[in-house]
Image (cartoon, rainbow, N blue to C red):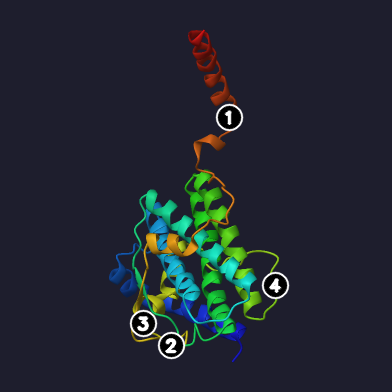
């Protein structure tokens, strides 16, 4: 069965799971599921996002410490992806997010080869893109354009990951003209990923019997060693507001003049 077929079956099965068992799943993980008449609250969105990022960090860390033989270029972009996912997680945690889990189950063949890694990662990154697009939609609906724009910033990066892992799996990396809107609310992504959170379900095939724990930020920073990323501010950073730079300059000029005068 092709990895593309696996991905379609997984996402379709997940959508059915969301309808059939969302309430039980939500209760198990303390998740407030959006009802048809309303939508996710901000806390639910960031909690689901933090769970996804914790999983992604665990996955890419395990990948880099596995025996898979990657090219040097593949290793570089997987390491950069790990650093990006950790940056996302730390941003979410700093803004009140709480992951629903910190241990995860993986399909037994995930770390067998670069192709199997890429195929599974493409499934996960497809979900992540859809979840952040749903977050952007909901933040806009809630009247918070800065959070919406920040969610879009993250969705862009998850889309980069999706392209790279598809290429690792031997698939066309840029196969869509738009990010796929898999979900209307971010909380709809959580039941889709139930197998990796609970170790139950067969939509991903046979799962390992023992969960793998998030390695922690210190271990990840040690593995990354030297950052490969250029600094970029989130839209929520006050310094990006229109006129903020001019205001900061105007405020700094008198202070600098006074300091220079006093020094004479």
Considering every residue shown, the one lying at the far front of the view is 264
Q: Earlier in the sequence, mark 4 or mark 2?
A: 4
Q: Check if mark 4's residue and mark 1's residue have beta carbons within 8 Å.
A: no
| Residue at position x 45%, y 74% in the image | 62
Q: Earlier in the sequence, mark 4 or mark 1?
A: 4
| Residue at position x 59%, y 92% in the image | 1
Q: Earlier in the sequence, mark 3 or mark 4?
A: 4
| Residue at position x 59%, y 78% in the image | 70
- The residue where tag 3 is placed is 199
Counting the numbered discs, the total is 4
Q: Mark 3 or 2, which is nearer the eye?
A: 3
- The residue where tag 1 is placed is 245
Q: Earlier in the sequence, mark 3 or mark 1?
A: 3
- The residue where tag 4 is placed is 175
Task: Pinpoint residue 255: horizontal percent, then vertical percent.
Answer: 50, 16
Q: Secondary structure at mark 2?
A: loop
Instruction: Indicate whether 186 appears above or below 17.
Output: above
Q: How far, Cα to Cα, is label 4 from label 1?
A: 39 Å
Task: Pinpoint residue 164: horizontal percent, then vertical percent.
Answer: 63, 70
Q: Is residue 6 visible?
A: yes
Q: How far, Cα to Cα, is label 2 from label 1?
A: 53 Å
| Residue at position x 60%, y 69% in the image | 162
Q: How far, Cα to Cα, is label 3 from label 1?
A: 50 Å
């Amino acid at each position: 069965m092709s990895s593309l077929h696996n991905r379609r079956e997984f996402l379709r099965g997940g959508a059915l799971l969301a309808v059939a068992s969302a309430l039980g799943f939500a209760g198990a993980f303390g998740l407030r599921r959006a009802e048809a008449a309303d939508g996710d609250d901000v806390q639910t969105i960031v909690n689901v996002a933090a769970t996804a990022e914790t999983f992604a960090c665990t996955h890419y860390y395990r990948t880099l410490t596995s025996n898979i033989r990657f090219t040097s270029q593949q290793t570089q972009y997987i390491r950069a992806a790990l650093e990006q996912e950790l940056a996302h997680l730390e941003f979410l945690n700093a803004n009140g997010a709480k992951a629903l889990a910190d241990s995860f189950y993986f399909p037994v063949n995930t770390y067998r080869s670069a192709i199997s890694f890429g195929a599974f990662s493409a499934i996960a990154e497809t979900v992540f893109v859809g979840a952040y697009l749903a977050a952007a939609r909901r933040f806009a609906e809630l009247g918070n354009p800065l959070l919406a724009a920040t969610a879009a910033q993250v969705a862009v990066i998850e889309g980069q990951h999706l392209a790279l892992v598809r290429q690792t799996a031997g698939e066309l990396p840029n196969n869509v003209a738009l990010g796929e809107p898999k979900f209307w609310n971010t909380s709809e992504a959580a039941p889709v990923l139930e197998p990796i959170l609970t170790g139950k379900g067969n939509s991903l095939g046979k799962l390992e019997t023992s969960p793998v724990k998030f390695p922690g930020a210190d271990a990840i920073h040690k593995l990354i060693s030297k950052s490969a990323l250029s600094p970029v501010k989130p839209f929520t950073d006050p310094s990006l507001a229109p006129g903020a730079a001019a205001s900061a300059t105007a405020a700094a000029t008198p202070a600098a003049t006074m300091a220079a005068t006093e020094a004479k």
